[in-house]
Image: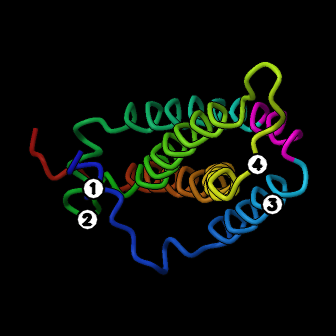
Amino acid sequence: MRHLLKALAFTPRELLQFDFFLGVLGGAAGWHLAQSNPVALGSVVSVVQQIVGAILGSVIAGVAIQAAFFDDQFLRKMKDSGTDPISCMAPFLFTAALGVVSMLLLIVLTAVTTPAPGDGPASSCGVWILATACGFTSVWTIASLVPALDTMVQFVRLKMEATDVPDSRKE
């Protein structure tokens, strides 16, 4: 776990991008929905769970594709240039970790808002806070795909530029 945390050691400037602020809006939407229409909350949570699950799958596939491009020759070139290969995967790893947190929160929200037979919808300050956390992490997960895709484009360009750099290993 410490290796993942080290890879995700972003600066505040790197974290406070547009995707974070969209997450804040998602949190506000979760709070508002939990207060104004707790019955609809279950439907929204169901859809969001599916979207976040699909994102987790695509992010894991993206990391696998990137990792496949890390052959020995390319890794030597990255080392020679002082580029950390983990930095190329960090946005995908961040999105995956954030997606896992989001899914766990969504599972808890589903559990606490599913009414028992004969009960009405759950509505309390705890549910409002949980809905806020779910909205924040879910929307941030969804929006963080854009920076991750940007990193993928940069990575492909780096891989292309590496073809012009001689390998430091003498064969």
Residue type, mark 2 in image:
Ser
Give 81 or 136, whichever is nearer the viewer: 136
Question: Would residue 56 be found to the left or right of residue 93 on screen?
Answer: right
Q: CA distance from mark 1 to mark 3?
A: 43 Å
Residue type, mark 4 in image:
Ser
Element class at badge 2: helix
Estimate the x, y position of residue 163 in percent, counting from the top left.
39, 49
Q: Nearer the viewer, mark 2 or mark 4?
A: 4
Question: Would residue 148 be found to the left or right of residue 118 on screen?
Answer: left
Give 68 or 92, whichever is nearer the viewer: 92
Q: Residue 83: which quarter of the image?
A: bottom left
> In the displayed structure, would residue 92 be above or below residue 30?
above
Identify the residue under disc 1: 78
Q: CA distance from mark 3 to mark 2?
A: 45 Å
- Whichever of labels 3 and 2 marks the residue nearer the N terminus, that label is 3
Residue located farthest toward the front when viewing the structure as drawn: 118
What's the coloring here?
Answer: rainbow
Identify the residue under disc 3: 29
Element class at badge 1: helix
Identify the residue under disc 4: 123
Pointer 2 and pointer 1: residues touching (CB < 8 Å)?
yes
Question: Would residue 63 be found to the left or right of residue 87 on screen?
Answer: right
Q: Nearer the viewer, mark 1 or mark 4?
A: 4
Q: Residue at x 90, y 49 (%)?
A: 37
Residue type, mark 3 in image:
Ala
